[in-house]
Image (cartoon, rainbow, N blue to C red):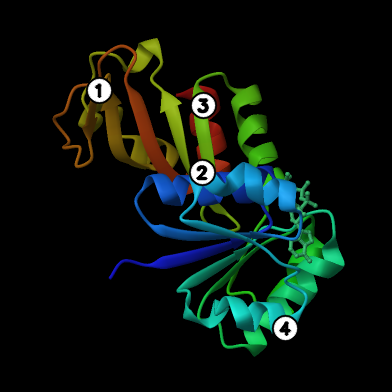
């Protein structure tokens, strides 16, 4: 059986997570204490219920333990987000993913039992900033503190050259893991593959090396 998800907090972030999972054919339970939010979400999830998730009894009644992953997408009410995460942990939920407003909030969420903490505003800020320094950078995703993946549009000086000729690993210390050419996605680029105009390189590397690559390549 495929994974079952519960999403608590159907604001912009939570409803987007819930809807995306539902559109990928997963079973998704949406939960919010606000009835209007639940009604708005109902067509985009498998089930939706009104509940205050800081209340342990309510969580038990929902059978929250039976879900493979529970996403805590409560934002502004930091106390409710922390209490909910704590209750989920105490009830034995296998995997808890929680959204944090800031670093401190994130640290507390880990302490009370979140398995993964996401920082959507911070991450989107980082992505937008990279796109601002170089319009060639389409996307930027942090993998670890110092390592990221970037999608970079090729510059004129790369066009017509092979990966071997560009030798980005030696020149910049980054690795090309894929090349997007229009609709085609080459996920195993070979040294002799030739770069065409408008291609997009997906590169992985240390943030400082990526910065140099974004600026100079
Ligand atoms: P977004 O940026 O995703 O819109 P936000 O940071 O504005 O989110 P909030 O609106 O604070 O987030 O919270 C998201 C949802 O969580 C709201 O719909 C709110 O009703 C719900 N929520 C808050 N506290 C609880 C709770 N204790 N139990 C269930 N749902 C809750």
Q: Is residue 113 visible?
A: no
Q: Position of residue 100 (x, y in %)?
A: 73, 59
State the residue position of label 4: 56
Instruction: Compute the Cα span from label 3 to label 1.
Output: 18 Å
- At x 62%, y 81%, the residue is 61
Q: Does the closest atom of ligand 1 sit within 8 Å of the Cβ of label 4?
A: no
Q: Is mark 2 within 8 Å of ligand 1?
A: no
Residue at disc 3, CB closer than 8 Å to ligand 1: no
Q: Nearer the viewer, mark 3 or mark 2?
A: 2
Which residue corresponds to the image point at 86% horizontal and 69% vertical from the top-left? 79
User: Which is more toward the observer, 157 or 34?
Assistant: 34
Label 2 sits on residue: 43
Q: Residue at x 30, y 11 (%)?
A: 197
Residue at label 3? 137
State the CA–CA distance, disc 4 to disc 1: 49 Å
Q: Quadrant of ligand 1?
A: bottom right
Check if mark 1's residue and mark 2's residue have beta carbons within 8 Å: no
The picture quadrant where one finds residue 123 is top right
Quick one: label 3 or label 1, which is nearer the N terminus?
Answer: 3
């Amino acid at each position: 059986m495929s994974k079952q998800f519960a999403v608590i907090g159907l604001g912009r972030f939570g409803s987007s997570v819930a809807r995306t999972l539902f559109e990928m054919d997963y079973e998704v339970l949406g939960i919010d204490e606000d009835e209007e939010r639940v009604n708005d979400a109902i067509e985009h999830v498998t089930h939706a219920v009104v509940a205050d998730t800081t209340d342990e009894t309510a969580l038990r009644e929902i059978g929250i333990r039976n879900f493979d992953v529970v996403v805590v997408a409560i934002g502004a009410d930091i106390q409710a987000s922390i209490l909910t995460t704590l209750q989920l942990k105490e009830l034995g939920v296998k995997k808890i993913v929680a959204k944090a407003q800031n670093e401190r909030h994130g640290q507390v969420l880990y302490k009370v039992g979140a398995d993964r903490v996401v920082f959507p505003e911070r991450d989107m800020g980082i992505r937008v900033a990279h796109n601002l320094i170089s319009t060639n950078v389409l996307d930027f995703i942090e993998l670890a503190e110092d390592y990221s993946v970037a999608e970079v549009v090729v510059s004129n000086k790369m066009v017509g050259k092979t990966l071997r000729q560009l030798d980005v690993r030696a020149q910049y210390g980054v690795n090309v893991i894929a090349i997007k050419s229009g609709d085609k996605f080459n996920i195993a680029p070979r040294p002799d593959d030739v770069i065409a105009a408008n291609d997009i390189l997906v590169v992985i590397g240390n943030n400082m090396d990526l910065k140099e690559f974004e600026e100079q390549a």
